[in-house]
Image (tube, helix red, strand yellow):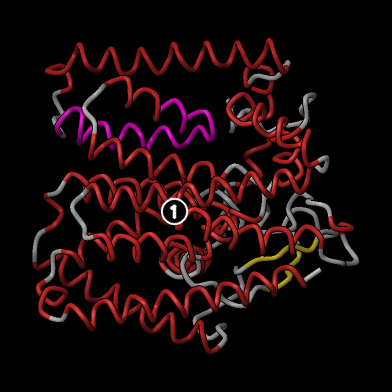
Amino acid sequence: MIIFIFFLSFYLFHGLNLITADRVKSEGQHENDMYFQADSRYAVSALTEPEVHHHRILLHPLFIIYFNPLGYIINQIVHDKDITATIYCAIVGALGVCAALYFFLNIGIGSLRSVLYASILGFSSSQLIFSIVPDSYIFSALGIILLLLIAEKSKDIKSWIAVSVYLLGITISNIAFAVSAAFFYLFKGNLRLVSYRKKLLQYMGGISVAFFLLSVLQKIIYQRWMFQYVGRAEKEQQFFVHFENMADALVRGKQLFMHLFYYNIVAPRPSLIQHPLFPSIDLISFQNDTLFSYALPGIVACLIWTAIIGIALWSFIKNRLYHHNLIKTALVCLAINIGIHFLYGEDLMLYSSHWTFFVIVLIFFSLEKTNLRKQYTLPYYLVLVIFSLFLMVNNSMEAAAIIKAF
């Protein structure tokens, strides 16, 4: 409860500052594409309005039926759709931190280290930004944590169906993460799935039936379902990346690496760039940043984070951790993200909620297995505490810079 209240307050502080800030553009309202190309206007509508104006249902097919009822109730109390959406995302972000804490405890990590690992997720730029900027991504982040929690804790097929439908309903590509986890945990990583024919039919059939029934229910209540927007799939082609030469591919690879392992954890200085499709729109982005784009707290945080990654990689190789189902799942899901977003998506920060928890799990699970942690317990705790503090300070500073950008 203390963790929940702390991070809820932390996200609400930044979120309410964002939505109430004076600025020339947007007049304090959430607009599409302003922040890392987040579809905030659509998200606010989907979260709060009884007559939803949300044309991205093809990619987020059940987002409305999942989250609009509670958002509508909150808005009847708050009477401000933007503030309601801000509160909603802050609540989900704080719940994600608590779910991460519960996950670490359930895989046998000590209480204090679990709190520190979960707090590092909570202070990460990905978790912070999408807990204050409305879109579907913080809801996906929570689902991914729940997926790994169920993977480690439950063999009940109903739990697997529920979390899979939840993830699929928020963003259709999320089903790849759910299926990957199911492959290693439900089906023991056995490529001969015919051996699990009954369980496979239950799993896939359960997902299909639940998804269809919820889609019909959403259609009845909100007059919105993905099948009426199939024609919009053509428009998604504009977000695919086309490389003119090998240099373009290398630049994309570098950007993807930085967003996978650095910008999603330690925020660099945000900058305004021109929208790639709509030149009249300026948007906040990390796309033009490098490791030299950090303020002093960010430099310290990056140095510590780089050391943490290095030790984790050494432990991963030395202890052959790729034999663990958790690590296999995280690696495959990271590979899926890399495969998708090397070719799709303009502002990579927008998708960082889909990979940040996998990265954190890989790194801290690897650190848990190293003898250095056990031999130097006090210094290890001290490093984690210092990193958490610098991460909080740096990302708070950059959140304030995002607020002032317009």
Q: Which residue is mark 1?
A: 97
Q: Position of residue 335 (x, y in %)?
A: 34, 50
Q: Left or right of 153: which side holds 288?
A: right
Decide whether the magenta segment is chiefly helix, strand or loop.
Answer: helix
Q: Position of residue 326 (x, y in %)?
A: 22, 47
**Is 187 a magenta residue?**
yes
Q: Is residue 262 above or below residue 325?
A: below
Q: Quadrant of residue 75?
A: top right
Q: Is residue 363 visible?
A: no
- Span highlighted in magenta in the image: 164-188
Q: Residue at x 79, y 63 (%)?
A: 282
Amino acid at the residue labelled 1: Val
Q: Residue at x 27, y 12 (%)?
A: 201
Residue that lies at the very extreme toward the front in this rendered image: 2
Q: Is residue 151 above or below residue 365?
A: above
Q: Residue at x 34, y 62 (%)?
A: 115
